[in-house]
Amino acid sequence: MILFPAIDLKEGQCVRLQRGLMEKATVFSDDPAAQAQAFAVAGFEWLHVVDLDGAFAGTSRNGPAVEAILKHCGLPLQLGGGIRDQAAIEGWLEKGVTRVILGTVAVRNPALVREAARAHPGRIVVGIDAKAGRVAVEGWAETSDMAATDLARAFEDAGVAAIVYTDIDRDGMLQGLNLPSTLELARAVSIPVIASGGLADIHDIERLLEPEAALLEGAIAGRALYDGRLDPKAALELIFAQRAAAAH
């Protein structure tokens, strides 16, 4: 189980939203690179970075902040938000992003996702953001009539590295992960699934380490880390202890 700390970028700052609403942004840092370094020092193994402005604009808007994170933090990084064409995908991979997350384009142009996954094995992630089980696009501003599980199944044989599944209604609300829906999706496909949206405290980490959640690749933690409700040391100790036990 990998715990991905989230860095959401808005106008060059590190923020958290509530249910994806830009007007509900809370600024937690004006130095995203320093925040990334702090996560590395805390012992995290990955970063999950989202260009929120880019998600709405359809093209990268926080490029300098992402590049600063890449320059100053050695952790592997998965990046989403406004990456909608092959040039953008390849541009970010060449700059050092480990995995690119494709959300809106997975609905609008699934052929591009397949093409990218073939060209860059292990480096393309599909982002599925859902409201009441239906896929939302364009920075969550629009909800489609497509079921999240149907979208996931569409990429079953595409070779994507993972699916990030976000429950929008819980995102930033500290109400706990929607594990039933996430596990339902994970059981529907063979692609590794990452849980996102609502992770609240150490109890969510404990639930993620229960046997039924073992098929998940990991989970994303955002507001709980920034608010201090989730102690990174305690969370990572639990995860690493379970990993060590499994190795034996």
Image (cartoon, grey):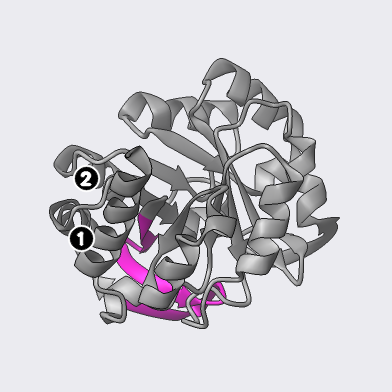
- Region rendered in magenta: 4-27
Against 148, residue 235 (above or below) is below
Q: Say whether residue 30 is left or right of residue 168.
A: left
Real-space Cα distance between discs 2 and 1? 11 Å
Other residues around mark 2 within 10 Å, as few (<14) / some (14–19) / many (≥20)? some
Q: Which residue is mark 2?
A: 68
Q: Residue at x 25, y 52 (%)?
A: 44
Q: Residue at x 60, y 31 (%)?
A: 160
Q: Which residue is mark 1?
A: 35
In front: mark 2 or mark 1? 1
* Magenta stretch contains residue 5: yes
Q: Residue at x 51, y 74 (%)?
A: 198
- What element does badge 1 sit on? helix
Name, please, the residue furthest toward the front.
248
> Percent from the top left, x then y, of residue 2?
39, 50
Q: Tell me the amino acid under the disc marked 2.
A: Ala
